Image (cartoon, rainbow, N blue to C red):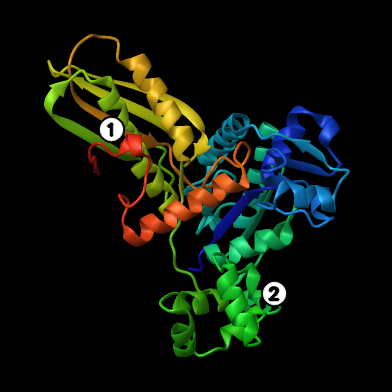
Amino acid sequence: MERAIVHMDLDAFFVSCEQLINSELKGIPLIIGGGDRGVVASCSYEARYFGVRSAMPMKMALSLCPQAKVVRGDMELYSKLSHQVTEVIEERAPVMEKASIDEFYLDVSGIDRFFGAYKWTNELASAVIKETGLPISFSLSVNKTVSKIATGEGKPNGNLQIPGDMVRPFLNPLSIRKIPMLGEVTFSLLSRIGIRNIKTLSEMPQEILQQMIGKNGLDLWKKANGIDSTPVQPYRDRKSVSSENTFSQDTIDLFKIRSILIGMVEKLAFQLRNEQWLTSVVTVKIRYANFDTQTKQCRVAYTSADHTLIRIVLELFDKLYDRRMRIRLVGVQFGGLVHGTYQIDLFEDTMEMMSLYQTMDRIKKRFGSDAVGRCVGTTLKSKVK
């Protein structure tokens, strides 16, 4: 039986959220982002017409489209609406994977016997639009790679169906830039030897690609040929990463405890970014000397930024620690994870802050997570599980 994999993507999600609460923003060039030194988090299709793109410096974006309306981002609003969309899809879909704050994969294989996969998916998309007010595009094909590429080609408000016998004709003329996870370095390398469309890439010998690109060469060749056996991973909101520290001696030294919490957050946030996760639920745990254990939790806007999570964790700790009693253990957990690449708060941080995070992450990847960090967070090592 041929697989039936759906990719659903909310159209210009941040922009659509702002337009939902303010109809005057519809039909105009709109940029979501921070101040003059910040970057573009998202932009409307009207702004994209002028060359504005996500992650572009705000100054450059406004020079391309000076008439654009700039709105500061509201991740709390976007997270809330993302959860609403998730609930609508999860309630109806047999298997759903939440790939990011605005993307979903569904496995509807075998549903043809009942309603027809395309018809069923079209009805689901209509339900999302009706119940949340947000526009959504989708594509149906035989695997994740093809369905994701097709959604990109069909947006906005596009619904495509690419059956198995049409995969190669569909992919062949497209630019290799359309292949998911193909970065600028790989694109430049392939372009220099004349490989610019997917058809040419698909015809390259696998061995040569592996020599040029390394272990990812075979994966890239498979995607170019429309081959992808990756399963749709069922969405589980409880997936988490956590860290705990048990003191050798019970303590009431709040400076020491705060330092340890900061160190935990730094390592966990790096883990999130390294594995391309965003967290939406933060939990702090305390175990007192008498073994009484308490936790405090809050829902946050999707993030993986150290400084944002440090502030939230310390605030939770201050609310949780309400006894003058020695502490035996402290812990931090980040839950409600979804895949995402928004490594820092695009709405508040400058280009300098983005560069600092990227540099620190490169150092940690090369020399280990303890190689660099805040001085206040380096008093003790914590165990990440």
For marks 1 and 2, give the one nearer the viewer.
1
Tell which residue pokes out farthest to the front in this image. Answer: 375
Question: Which percent across, then down, holds residue 62?
Answer: 81, 47
Q: Which amino acid does label 2 sit on?
A: Leu
194 sits to left or right of 208: right
In what element is the residue under mark 1?
helix
Label 2, on which residue?
174
Q: Which residue is drawn at 66% across and 87% down?
A: 194
**Nearest the camera: 336 or 296?**
296
Where does label 1 land, which residue? 260
Res 268 visible? yes
The reply to whether residue 275 is visible in this rendering is no
Q: Position of residue 262 (x, y in %)?
A: 35, 34
293 to the left or right of 43:
left
Question: At label 1, which amino acid type do we have?
Answer: Ile
Q: Which residue is drawn at 57% across and 88% down?
A: 203
Q: Position of residue 292 (x, y in %)?
A: 17, 16
**Dot 2 crowding, Cα within 10 Å, few <14, some 14–19, many 20+:** some
